[in-house]
Image (cartoon, helix red, strand yellow):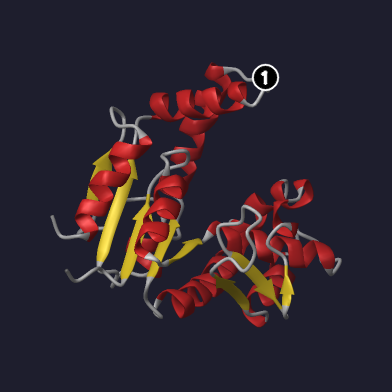
Amino acid sequence: MTLPSIVAIDGPAASGKSTLGFRLAESLGYLYFDTGLMYRAVTWLALNRGINIQDAASVTRLAEDVPIEVAPPSLEDGRPCDVVVDGHDITWDIRKPEVESNVSAVSAYPGVRKALTLQQRRIGLRGRVVMVGRDIGTVVLPEADLKIYLDASPEERARRRYDEIINRGGKASYDDILSKMIERDRIDSTRAIAPLKPAADAIILDSDRLDADAVFEKAYDLCAGQ
């Protein structure tokens, strides 16, 4: 059995990409790489160096000049991978609230997206990787051996996100989550640079009526050529 060396998984927010990507990478013995980590890394770097997040030129230069490395997890502390900058492990730093509240602005800068696409390709082209995002099969790694577009209706994705929050003991409004989900879809699919869409040769998996195990089984079968 010849396995695909590069697996690209795209799809809208809360479609289950991260869950699928991690399980698939673990089963194949591949690197799991959620490209959103790089945008978080640049955001953390900018904040750590006192760079104004609203200064697009300075943030872009940072993304162009600082190599970001993503590697298999070196510690068993729940991390899916290591994120390293200048020899420093920032895997958990990029999860801090101040990064969360600023990463959207950073990821919208065209220059940052262009710079990080090059960094993502640098890692992805090494092979033995499952890369997850919104433009992997179309922009970052169009040469990927297997492209999966994991989809689900906004209503189903909002329900999953709502259940996740409630099960953690939090409070949430389904209608509010759904409204934000629809708006996020609109922004992602209509942006001028790297809009969210399936690659022409992507295999679309609709997970509306599938649980995580069933989605994984279908994806693994695709890897195995079944």
Query: 24 above or below 184?
Result: below
Total marks in image: 1
Q: Position of residue 88 (x, y in %)?
A: 75, 74
Horizontally, residue 181 falls left or right of residue 106, namely: left
From the image, tell me which residue sits under label 1: 171
Q: At 47% from the left edge and 49% from the top edge, which residue is drawn?
A: 18
Q: Position of residue 2 (x, y in %)?
A: 19, 71
Query: 130 above or below 87?
Result: above
Horizontally, residue 45 falls left or right of residue 175, namely: right
Report which quarter residue 195 is drawn in.
bottom left
Farthest-out residue, left:
226
Q: At 63% from the left edge and 20% from the top edge, which residue is drawn?
A: 172
Farthest-out residue, right:
50
Q: Position of residue 191 (x, y in %)?
A: 46, 51
Q: Nearer the viewer, residue 74 or 219?
A: 74
Q: At 47% from the left edge and 41% from the top edge, which residue is drawn?
A: 13
Q: At 61% from the left edge and 67% from the top edge, which residue is drawn?
A: 82
- Residue 109 visible in the snapshot: no
Q: Position of residue 4 (x, y in %)?
A: 26, 68
- Per the image, label 1 sits on a secondary structure element best described as loop
Q: Residues within 10 Å of mark 1 (few under 14, many from 20)?
A: few
Q: Nearer the viewer, residue 170 or 45?
A: 170
Q: Nearer the viewer, residue 35 or 25?
A: 25
- Residue 74 visible in the snapshot: yes
Q: Nearer the viewer, residue 58 or 17?
A: 17
Quadrant where the C terminus sits is: bottom left
Quadrant where the N terminus sits is: bottom left
Report which quarter residue 38 is drawn in.
bottom right
Which amino acid type is marked by label 1? Lys
